[in-house]
Image: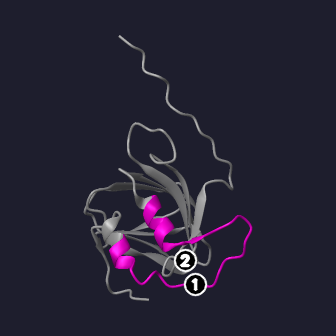
Amino acid sequence: MTARPAGEIKVLGPQEGESFWQPVPANGFVRNLFSDKSVASVNRFAMGTQTVAPRSFIREHTHDRNEEIIFVVKGRGIARMDGVDHPLEEGSCVFVGHDRKHHFLNPHDEPLTFLWLFMPGGLDAFFAQIGRPRRPGEPTPEPFPRPENVAEIEARTVFGWTDPSFNQ
């Protein structure tokens, strides 16, 4: 029997990894930390953080082929799961199975930051395609619109359904 080689080890510092400013209505920014495309993993996944700006939200949506875990690192907010509101605070954790409607809201005056783990991956590609590159230390840009072809980007990446009522 042949021994299998050991897997990869990779460490990112607090300002490393791809980062993208996000358009309305979430505003804020995303850091794409690791994925099966950035490390030699056996399984497909994507992991990063998202900071939702004060008084902003992530539109209601589903993922038809993916599962998601959200862990709140800082701030407070609301996870609306299939229409039911669940308060979030530092240390809260949410599992979202495929085809479940979910929506994250930050009605507060402070940012809401959470870690996301997405299986089997692809959320990082979506964020890169709709966002604008972000560099550490640069000022927050004015809110900007989603790309005109956002529905096409959603369909070819990781979304099953998205709330069409927000059309900015």
Q: Position of residue 22 (x, y in %)?
A: 54, 74
Q: Position of residue 109 (x, y in %)?
A: 61, 78
When the figure is inspected, residue 61 is found, relative to residue 89, above or below; the finding is below
Mark 2 falls on what kind of element? loop
Give the mark nearer the N terminus: 1 vs 2: 2
Distance between mark 1 and mark 2 Cα atoms: 6 Å
Q: Residue furthest top?
A: 1
Q: Which residues are magenta?
A: 124-153
- Packing grade of label 1 (10 A; few <14, some 14-19, many >=20) is some
Q: Position of residue 139 (x, y in %)?
A: 72, 76
Indicate the quadrant where residue 123 lies: bottom left
Whether residue 93 appears in magenta in the rendering, the answer is no
Q: Residue furthest right?
A: 137
Q: Is residue 20 visible?
A: yes
Q: Position of residue 165 (x, y in %)?
A: 33, 87
The circle drawn on residue 94 is none
| Residue 64 appears left or right of 13 | left
Q: Going 52% across and 62% down the picture, which residue do you hit?
A: 89
Circle 2 residue: 27
When the figure is inspected, residue 85 is found, relative to residue 70, above or below; the finding is below
The circle drawn on residue 143 is 1
For the residue pair 35 and 71, the one nearer the viewer reads as 35
Whether residue 143 appears in magenta in the rendering, the answer is yes
Where does the N terminus fall, quadrant-wise? Answer: top left
Q: Amino acid at mark 1?
A: Pro
Q: Amino acid at mark 2?
A: Asn
Q: Going 48% across and 64% down the picture, which residue do you hit?
A: 88
User: Are the residues flagged by discs 1 and 2 in contact, CB closer than 8 Å?
Assistant: yes
Q: Going 35% across and 64% down the picture, which residue do you hit?
A: 157
